[in-house]
Amino acid sequence: MIIYSVGLGPGDPELITVKARRILEESDTVVVPQSDETGRSVAREIVLQYIPEERIMMYYFPMNNDREELQRRYTDLAGKIKGLADSGKKVCYVTMGDPTIYSTSNYLTQKLLELGIQVRHIPGISSINAASTMLSLPLCIKGENFGVYEMPSEVEKAVELIRRHPTTVFMKVNKRLPVLVEAVRAVRPERAYLVRRIGLDGETIYDMLNCAPPPEAAYLSVAVIRSKILTGHKK
Ligand SMILES: C[S@@+](CC[C@H](N)C(=O)[O-])C[C@H]1O[C@@H](n2cnc3c(N)ncnc32)[C@H](O)[C@@H]1O
């Protein structure tokens, strides 16, 4: 009994792997987490490009920090998936980007393993890679490291993180956009971009050294900040 945890990539239908597509097409049931920060399920829209609606099973995860409620939901979903697999169905579970990065898949996998179910992960192109390649900015070159963080709530912390690496990536900016704007203003890095809805309708790049992004830019967006620029790398 193997359940697949499939990364869907950032949203562009051409940025899903051949393997992920095959697993979707071969599955009897594709479990899709319901709702993202915008209140819609972007994952569902992507999956619908490959399989008919009848094979999709939506599952709701509340967007709050009630850990107990979330644990209950993961346990419940793992049980439902086990039930489907026990009845002979091929089941996969999808997440945006890569399943190992800030993903519900990480928690669900744990619950499935506890039930004795094997989980095989199919990597997806993460929004981190999609953003840096879209901007043609290096995440790191020889001798460097880069940092990926959830957007902190304090400007001082954000400043410290930006100064810690040649490239810093902030995810889940959301309500903390003003913190990001303040931190970029304080550090004045070589490059600072907020990339919104990569591969989806409304995709936008905001050059934060020219203007502060509007409030709606904060949702489903990744900030890429580069303090050291390579010779010849033009804006
Ligand atoms: C719950 S995390 C999921 C990350 C995902 N597993 C990945 O590998 O990209 C959600 C965050 O990922 C980023 N994200 C995911 N998809 C995105 C997209 N299409 N465009 C921009 N940012 C995205 C945003 O920072 C968002 O707040």
Image (spheres, rainbow, N blue to C red):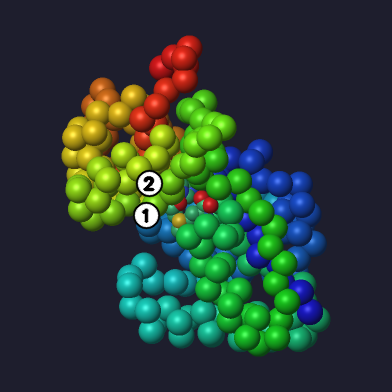
Report the residue at 54% width, 38% height from top: 130
Disc ID at residue 170: 2
- The residue wearing badge 1 is 150
Three-letter code for the amino acid on which mark 2 is drawn: Phe
Q: Do the residues labelled 2 and 1 touch (CB within 8 Å)?
A: yes
Q: Does the residue labelled 2 lie within 8 Å of ligand 1?
A: yes
In the picture, measured across the screen, residue 153 lies left or right of residue 24, that is: left
**Residue at the outermost front position:** 143
In the picture, measured across the screen, residue 145 lies left or right of residue 220, that is: right
In the picture, measured across the screen, residue 165 lies left or right of residue 16, that is: left
Report the residue at 38% width, 84% height from top: 68
Report the residue at 63% width, 86% height from top: 114
Report the residue at 48% width, 65% height from top: 34
User: Disc 2 and disc 1: Cα gap in Å?
Assistant: 6 Å
| SS category of the residue bearing label 1 | strand
What x and y, as percent, mark residue 134?
52, 30
What x and y, as percent, mark residue 225?
37, 35
Which residue is more in the foreground, 34 or 10? 10
